[in-house]
Amino acid sequence: MPTTTSWTELPTLTGELIRLEPLRSEHAAGYLEAVGTGESAQEVFRWLSMYPPTTLAEARQQIEEGIDSPVRRPFVQLDAQTGEVAGTTSYYEISPATRSLAIGHTWLGQRWWRSGHNTESKLLLLTYAFETLGAVRMVWHTDIYNERSQAAIARLGATREGELRKHRVRRDGSWRTTVQYSMTDDDWPAARDHLSARLGRG
């Protein structure tokens, strides 16, 4: 059942590896450092709609655009052990009326790839959505060519629903076919147990 918790106010969600807080402009320096430089930064931002920032001003601008977006509610992803900025993620397409929302606009600096941080981040976001907000449906969108992302979403326990042709415009101006995945509240208990087990907490 839905709760009285606001769907537009972001909580702070804390795990053993990652802590999610509302993204703020003062995170800009850590944001820039987490992105990295050169080929590393290009790989981190490869599938995003924006280019990796190269200056503090650009990092701050990207953060402010996320905060000001009418459709996104962005989190900063912080390393729970060191407090360093590890990346960002967002809830978007938030619909209290249909009790649904999406997770996306996500990136992690390469230091945190294949480390469990992304899995725990998704577990925190899903737990809050299904168990606090009372959501019945969670959605993910990813580029049809981003096979790494598709595999990661499938490992969460999400179901591939199909392809949305000419769904978005990539940053190079080409049309993107989007692969859409979802998870419902019926799927959630098994997914929660699976993700908890992956993190060694099952």
Image (cartoon, grey):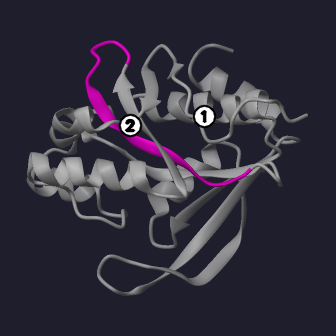
Residue bearing mark 2: 23
> What residue appears at the point 17 percent right and 42 percent down from the top-left corner?
32
- Of the two numbered discs 1 and 2 on the same chain, state the one appearing first in sequence: 2
Residue underneath mark 1:
125
- Location of the C terminus (image quadrant): top right
Question: Front-most of 110 and 85?
Answer: 85
Chief secondary structure of the magenta portion: strand
Q: Is residue 110 magenta?
A: no
Q: Secondary structure at mark 2?
A: loop
| Residue 39 left/right relative to 179 | left
Position of residue 120 relative to residue 68, above or below, is above
Q: Quadrant of the N terminus?
A: top right
* Label disc, if present, on residue 84 of the rendered structure: none
User: Which amino acid type is shown beneath numbered disc 1?
Assistant: Leu
Q: CA distance from mark 1 to mark 2?
A: 15 Å
What residue is drawn where x is 32% and y is 76%?
171
- Kindly identify the amino acid type of the residue bearing the numbered disc 2: Leu
Residues at badges 1 and 2 in contact (C-beta under 8 Å)? no
The 10 Å Cα crowd at callout 1, few under 14, some 14 to 19, many 20 or more, is some
The percent coordinates of residue 27 (x first, y second) are 26, 33
SS at mark 1?
A: helix
45 lies left or right of 93: left
Total labels: the figure holds 2
Where residue 37 appears, x then y in whole percent?
10, 49
Q: Residues within 10 Å of mark 2 (few under 14, many from 20)?
A: many
Q: For residue 139, which quarter of the picture? A: bottom right
Task: Give the magenta part as a residue range.
Answer: 80-95
Left or right for 15, reference 38: right
In front here: 149 or 126?
Answer: 126
Tell me residue 153's x, y (percent): 59, 50
Q: Residue at x 59, y 28 (%)?
A: 124
